[in-house]
Image (tube, grey):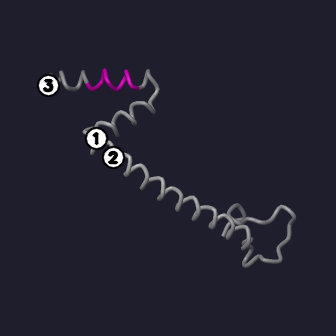
Amino acid sequence: MSEANVAEFPSGDKSDDVGGVAGKRLKSFLERIERLEEEKSALAEDIRDVYAEAKSAGFESKIMRRIIKLRKMEVEKRREEDELLELYMAAIGME
C-alpha cells in the first residue's frame, strides 16, 4: 500500500492504526457515507412518490424528467443540443 493511500490523524496519534491505517478515522468516513447513502435512498423514494403523484394528476413523468434535465443545463448548452438534434434529424429526413 502506498503512502498516499494511508491516512493518519493530524495529531500523529497512531494508537488505533492497523497496518498503517487510521481505523477510527476510516470508520468515521465509512459511517458518514453510509448515512448519506441512506438519506439518498430516502430522497430517491420521495422523488418517485412525487412523480407518481404528478402522473395521477395527468402529467407524463418521462416528459417531466426531461424538463428537469433541461432546466439543469446552461441555456447555451441547451441551444447547442437543440441545434444538433435538428441538424441530425434533417440529415435523416425527419421533421
Instruction: Compute the Cα span from label 2 to label 3.
Output: 34 Å
Residue 45 is marked as none
Amino acid found under the numbered disc labelled 1: Ala
Residue identifier under label 3: 94
- Does 70 appear above or below 33? above
User: Toward which corner of the image does residue 26 lie, by quadrant?
Assistant: bottom right
Q: Name the main secondary structure of what is drawn in magenta.
A: helix
- Residue 91 forms part of the magenta stretch: no
* Residue 87 pos. (x, y %): 24, 21
Report the mark closest to the observer, 3 or 1: 1
- Please report the residue visible at 24 percent of the width from the left and 22 percent of the height from the top: 86
Whether tag 3 and tag 1 are in contact, CB under 8 A, the answer is: no
- Does 1 appear above or below 37? below
- Please report the residue visible at 37 percent of the width from the left and 51 percent of the height from the top: 48
Whether tag 2 and tag 1 are in contact, CB under 8 A, the answer is: yes
Magenta residues span 78-85
Task: Please tell me which of labels 2 and 3 falls first in the chain.
Answer: 2
- 67 or 19: which is nearer to us? 67
**SS for callout 1:** loop
Circle 1 residues within 10 Å: few <14, some 14–19, many ≥20: few
Residue identifier under label 2: 53
Amino acid found under the numbered disc labelled 2: Glu
Residue identifier under label 1: 57
The answer to whether residue 26 is left or right of residue 49 is right
User: Toward which corner of the image does residue 91 lie, by quadrant?
Assistant: top left
Instruction: Compute the Cα span from label 2 to label 1.
Output: 6 Å
Report the mark closest to the observer, 2 or 3: 2
Amino acid found under the numbered disc labelled 3: Met
- Does 66 appear above or below 32? above
